[in-house]
Amino acid sequence: MTTVQPENKTYSFAEYVQLEQNEGVRYEFWDGEVFAMAGSTKRHNRIVQSLSRILYPFSQQNGCEVFTENVRQKLNQGERYVYPDVIYTCDPADIDNDMAASVASPSLLIEVISQSTERIDTHDKRPHYTKLPSLLYYVLIHQTAYRAEVFERNVNFWKYRLIEGADALIDLPLIDIIIPMTNVYDGIVLPAEWFDS
């Protein structure tokens, strides 16, 4: 999702939380700066809902939780909070307090990207996400093609895989999850020219 800068002001974390409550708008928080989250498309929302449905049975089997869009992710450096599209966490500290508004230790983060958000999700957020010690996978899902980019933790480096095609599987072995690509795009008709783009 893209973000828009509101008024030029530095906020404390408490002021930021109050701003969200007062305005009913989600903001990402970056060391005192706040960025309003822009609205998304129906397709974006449909893909996020599909991912949540797919991940839910895995979360129940493994004692984990799935959160979408309205739960903050705490980043490791500075005082920074962002809103990934999907958070999958198995950390008891993230799960036990269901009144908390943020997660600190995810196993999987997913962003559904568009042309306008690709740079932010790929280049701006990824370096911060991959510094989270608990994170095993960062996945980018494209809206206009059967395409997923998977970043997988491998001890001291991150492996990259590009997965394409309606019949492909997004295999995440470190957390025992397999996501059929066709299920991700359930209810979405992609024009033929986008299948292999």
Image (tube, grey):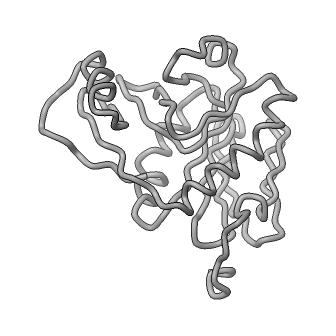
Residue placed at 63% from the left, 83% from the top? 191
Q: Position of residue 49 (x, y in %)?
A: 65, 49
Query: Is 156 placed left or right of 117 in the picture?
Result: right
Task: Check the image and name the residue furthest to the bottom.
Answer: 193
Task: Check the image and name the residue furthest to the left.
Answer: 8
Q: Position of residue 187 (x, y in %)?
A: 70, 66
Residue placed at 56% from the left, 63% from the top? 43
Q: Is residue 3 above or below residue 145?
A: above
Q: Is residue 130 above or below residue 178?
A: above
Residue placed at 62% from the left, 81% from the top? 194
Q: Number of numbered discs present?
A: 0
Residue placed at 61% from the left, 50% from the top? 48
Choose between 163 and 161: the one closer to the eye.
163
Choose between 34 and 154: the one closer to the eye.
34
Q: Position of residue 60 (x, y in %)?
A: 82, 28
Choose between 195 and 151: the one closer to the eye.
195
Q: Is residue 93 above or below residue 49?
A: above
Image quarter (top left, top right, bottom left or bottom right) of the C terminus = bottom right
Query: Is 181 placed left or right of 39 in the picture?
Result: right
Quarter holding residue 95: top right
Q: Position of residue 72 (x, y in %)?
A: 48, 30
Query: Is 180 placed left or right of 73 in the picture?
Result: right
